[in-house]
Amino acid sequence: MSKNLSSVQIFLSLYLLSSFGLAQEIDWPYDDYYTEDKLYIHAIVNYDIHPMWHDHWENNLFRQNMLRMSFGSISLTELFSDVSLAMNQEVTKGIWFRYATAYYATHHRNEQDKHLSTGFEKYIFKSFSLFAYGNPHFEKEEIDIHYGISLTNKDRTSYFRVAYIDVDTFWDDKNNINSVNLTRPWRLGWETNVRFKSFRFFSSGRYENGIERIFERAPASFDFDYQRKKINDMIFKLYYYRTPKSFLEISYSCYQYDEAKRFHHLFYDYEYQNRIESYKIGYVTPIGERYRLRFGSFALLQNAAAAHYREHDYSRHEIIPYIFGEMYAGPGIVEAGYMVSKYAWDYSAPAPIPGGTRDDYIDKVKIAYTLNLANRAYLQFALSHVTAIWGFGGGNVQFWIQF
């Protein structure tokens, strides 16, 4: 009898170990960088493209062919990446072709942003036009279709565009993982650029109802059978131009990430939300014929929380003032800059967390040279380093071309 009981105990122990103890851990990247002191200073100041480039990009987004890229080291193994391509061509009178892609990868975003759209726009009456775009994705179930309207001025530098986006149009018919939408996902996308006297207003963004799906995969201890996810991302900018090369910028941006998953093992079920708000004030001005100065500050607020698996609450606020001086030298510009991040976070969870609360600062210096290639292409090489000798340094390469 005791031998039989021992056999049963051994069997139950092995079953429990195989079901829980040896189950593959789920991917959980959400709190990887909560305690990173350089989380924002890299992406939004150190490696961001020049405000003059942003200005040109926004004014010519639907009339020129442009490419911009910025790559910078954010860790020993990862590279900040910001790439955008916009191609616009009037193929015949009143009909425009457009191809646009964007890729953005950094630590403070929960996912890498990858966007592609291509299609045609047709003027219907004077400045009013209709457009239809799509993203020809390799997995057909992830193809989106855009239906939009546009109002533009004659040279297409001022515009108001809004699109209804049918997200993953063929998901229910084309996916091969036995997944079904519980609600039809849609997205509202917009871009607007309006100038009035010495002011200019620019905005772009996306607002969506999100996906909600069930999955019927073969049973596995780490597979999920339900997912809900929503990502909203938007920016609003107001410019005041004292002269064409001297302007003040005030901006606000908001990024919201919301995801929930339900697994075969209830232990891994989770809900996660993350909201990041950014405020900026900045000024750019020439000083004489050879010099230019830009300075300003960012203020950031982040709030995140998870329920069930890896339950926690996280809040962070940060102020990042900066100043850069530029001097025309030879065929380009020499740039030197200084930036400071004053941050504080509170990261709490049921189990104690090392470094869960912190209030501190970090500062960096940057030196760069931007090569001007016939006023249509620019190539920048930069080095930056925290002021501590043994701190983190990083290289940055930026490229801009209009063609």
Image (tube, rainbow, N blue to C red):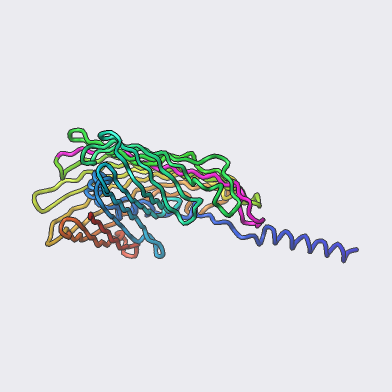
Location of residue 348 in the rendering, given as x and y in whole percent from the top left corner: 52, 47
Residue sitting at x 54%, y 44%:
228
Is 262 situated left or right of 40 in this image?
A: right
User: Residue 130 magenta-drawn?
Assistant: no
* Residue 81 to residue 214: above or below: below
Which quadrant of the figure has residue 377? bottom left
Residue 218 lies within the magenta run:
yes
Main SS of the magenta segment?
A: strand
393 above or below 253?
A: below
Q: Position of residue 219 (x, y in %)?
A: 67, 56
Left or right for 59, reference 100: left
Q: Depth check: 246 or 196 in front?
A: 196
In the rendered image, the residue lying farthest to the front is 92
Comparing 214 with 249, the one in front is: 214
Q: Nearer the viewer, residue 396 or 96?
A: 96
In the picture, measured across the screen, residue 316 lies left or right of residue 365, that is right
In the rendered image, the residue lying farthest to the right is: 1
Q: Residue at x 37, y 39 (%)?
A: 148
**Can residue 253 be spotted in the picture?**
no
The span shown in magenta is 214-242
Q: Which quadrant of the rendered structure holds the N terminus?
A: bottom right
Q: Position of residue 251 (x, y in %)?
A: 30, 40
Determine if residue 196 is in view: yes
**Furthest-left residue in this view:** 289
Give x and y (percent) for residue 350.
58, 48
